[in-house]
Image (spheres, helix red, strand yellow):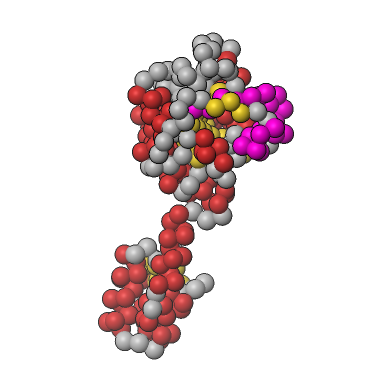
Amino acid sequence: MQATPSYLALHPAQELWPERLRTLEGAPQALWLRGQVSHLATPRTVAIVGSRAPSPYGEAQARRFAGALARAGIAVVSGLARGVDHAAHEAALDAGGKTIAVLGCGVDRPWPAGPLAERMALEGLLVSEYEPGREPRPHHFPLRNRIISGLADGVLVIEAAQASGSLITARWAADQGRIVWALPGRVDHPHSRGTHRLLRDGATLVEDPEEIVRELLGTAPAERERAATLEELQGLEQQLVAALEGETLSSAELVERVQGEAVPVLATLVELELRGLVLRGPGGLWRRL
């Protein structure tokens, strides 16, 4: 992929202007872009934000969610800051997906500078409402959070203190009518207090990236893969899966239902269980997954 040579100035009247920003209160008057400009047209986008000093758990979850979302074709938006932002961008890039960083400075001088910023300028997309050459200023970062949430269908908060930029982004998201997801954390960790506060205030609790994928795309990757596998079933496999539709049956009952023999039926059930299509529960009763 080729990066944008330097930067591109984008204005609301232009076709490439993100539709999500057209009705945004306090929308930027212009955006400067550097990198893969086509990322702006990604149909589904999720912002991932959180602590700049996450616990190992927080960083691992940021990578887990960002990688899974990117593999599902959902663009990951964040702010390039150290910690959760950094982990989310990097995981999305490593997954071969799309990721967008909204900056509080010019796109020609991303902050913090370093290998990730350089990689984002090539493989991802850097976005800013500040002109090239503009240095980062403390008051720029809370303001840029409205663009992070504005570009997304929803915001996922992973580890946030009681007073943090992540909660500002979540408030922007709620005001903009975006979905707010929060990942629960350890009750004795200070960076769980912000996310738990969001959950008390009505944010959606998530534990698995597939929950977000399902909400945005209708089905999660594992479900689509299972559906594709079901379509490939033939013969006895297909008969057994069909017999378990809405039922919980013993192997003897299944033998009777498919009018088969015990040994082939049991062998096929074990194979289906290994493929994650059926499950043997207490009492030897089989059911569909």
Q: Is residue 20 magenta?
A: yes
User: What residue is rendered at 55% in x and 52% in y?
Assistant: 217
Q: Residue furthest front?
A: 5
Left or right, 203 with respect to 241, comes to right
Left or right, 152 with respect to 112, comes to right
Residue 98 visible:
yes
User: What residue is rendered at 60% in x and 40% in y?
Assistant: 153
The quadrant of the image that shows the C terminus is: bottom left
Mostly what secondary structure, the magenta segment?
loop
Q: Residue furthest bottom?
A: 259
Q: Nearer the viewer, residue 22 or 141?
A: 22
Q: Which residues are magenta?
A: 13-34
Tell me residue 32's x, y (percent): 56, 24
User: What residue is rendered at 40% in x and 18% in y?
Assistant: 113
How many labels, in total?
A: 0
Tell me residue 249's x, y (percent): 43, 75
Whether residue 281 is situated above or below residue 202 in the rendered picture? below
Q: Nearer the viewer, residue 107 or 261?
A: 107
Hey, which quadrant is residue 284 in on the image? bottom left
Left or right, 162 with respect to 277, comes to right
Tell me residue 189's x, y (percent): 44, 25
Residue 55 visible:
no
Tell me residue 271's x, y (percent): 30, 70
Q: Is residue 8 magenta?
A: no
The quadrant of the image that shows the N terminus is: top left
Q: Nearer the viewer, residue 282 or 176?
A: 176
User: What residue is rendered at 41% in x and 77% in y?
Assistant: 238
